[in-house]
Amino acid sequence: MPLRSLAALPLVCFVFLNPFCRGDEAAEKLVLATYKLANGSSTATGTVYQREKEGKPQRFLVTAGHVFEAMTGDSCTLVSRSLREDKVYVRQELTIPVRQEGKPLWKKHAEQDLAVLLLPESASVEALPVDCLATEELLEQVRVGDAVRLAVFPERSEANPAGFPILRGGVLASHPIVPAKPHPAFLVDTTAWPGDSGGPVSHATLRSPSGGPVVIGVVRGMRNITDTVKESRFVERKTSYPLGISEVLHAVFAREVIETNW
């Protein structure tokens, strides 16, 4: 065997032995609780979380604030799935109210581009426990370079006809991660696309108290640089270039919205 082929063997072994390359139940739970949100003026991603309060279940749809704000009308479509007896998932589109008489039903964080909508009881969809949303204390364990997962709908694309999101991977690309208030957003080294806004970002190895994924952030958008060229005395041309990096808001802000309003 040529020396060039032998030199490639350690890399091949790393790819197959790296635990981040293996799927697990936490990743599946993340995918099951993540949905495409569609409206004539806005298509994005959202994740549903649930808890019980006074003996009654509450389900919260978490996404980026600009997702709801860009929607026209009083409702949007949530692309859900139902599992038949033959183990086949079937697409199920639900109409979700987002406004009532033109007034927003969602609650937006006071300072960040993050919003939460309390779903009606009739919207029986898969959800993650609220304890899957990271706390500031748990974020102390997170470091730049850690592997993360994103469940998203890049360019509105779905993984399959059932309407599941696409699970992507990346690494945390900025430091420091905490504290969240002075550093409300962090970067992930993976490209963000239209349709990804609101998508959950989970840590690859940390687990919530209930054994689910730890969602550390919500996709806000893509990082661009803008080049300005002055073509004449009266004309300037601006060109934006994507850097292949996602901007992500801390999920602790979603916790704040839920605890403040419900």
Image: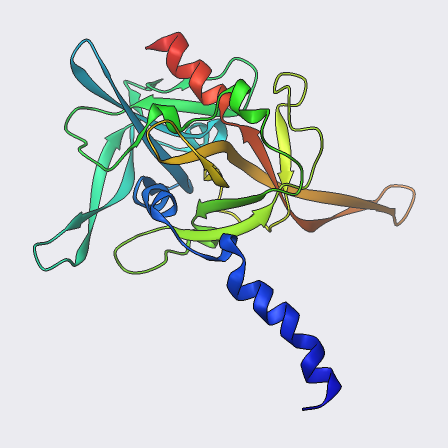
Q: Does 237 appear above or below 217?
A: below
In the picture as drawn, the residue positioned furthest to the right comes out as 233
- Residue 37 makes an appearance in the image: no
Q: Position of residue 22 (x, y in %)?
A: 44, 56
Colour scheme in use: rainbow
Q: Does 50 appear above or below 189?
A: above
Q: How many numbered discs, if any?
A: 0
Residue name at image x 73 percent, y 83 percent? 4
Q: Foreground: 5 or 201?
A: 5
Q: Position of residue 87 (x, y in %)?
A: 14, 57
Q: Does 198 appear above or below 168?
A: above
Q: Foreground: 241 or 182?
A: 182
- Would residue 166 be found to the left or right of residue 170 on screen? left
Task: Report which quarter residue 80 is drawn in.
Answer: top left
- Would residue 179 be found to the left or right of residue 151 on screen? right
Q: Foreground: 233 or 83?
A: 83
Q: Locate the C terminus and report the quarter of the image it occupies.
A: top left
Task: Report which quarter residue 101 is drawn in.
Answer: top left
- Residue 89 makes an appearance in the image: yes
Residue name at image x 33 percent, y 46 percent? 25
Residue name at image x 51 percent, y 52 percent? 20
- Would residue 122 be found to the left or right of residue 237 on screen? left
Q: Position of residue 175 (x, y in %)?
A: 71, 32
- Would residue 101 be found to the left or right of residue 158 on screen? left
Q: Does 112 appear above or below 225?
A: above
Q: Locate the N terminus and report the quarter of the image it occupies.
A: bottom right
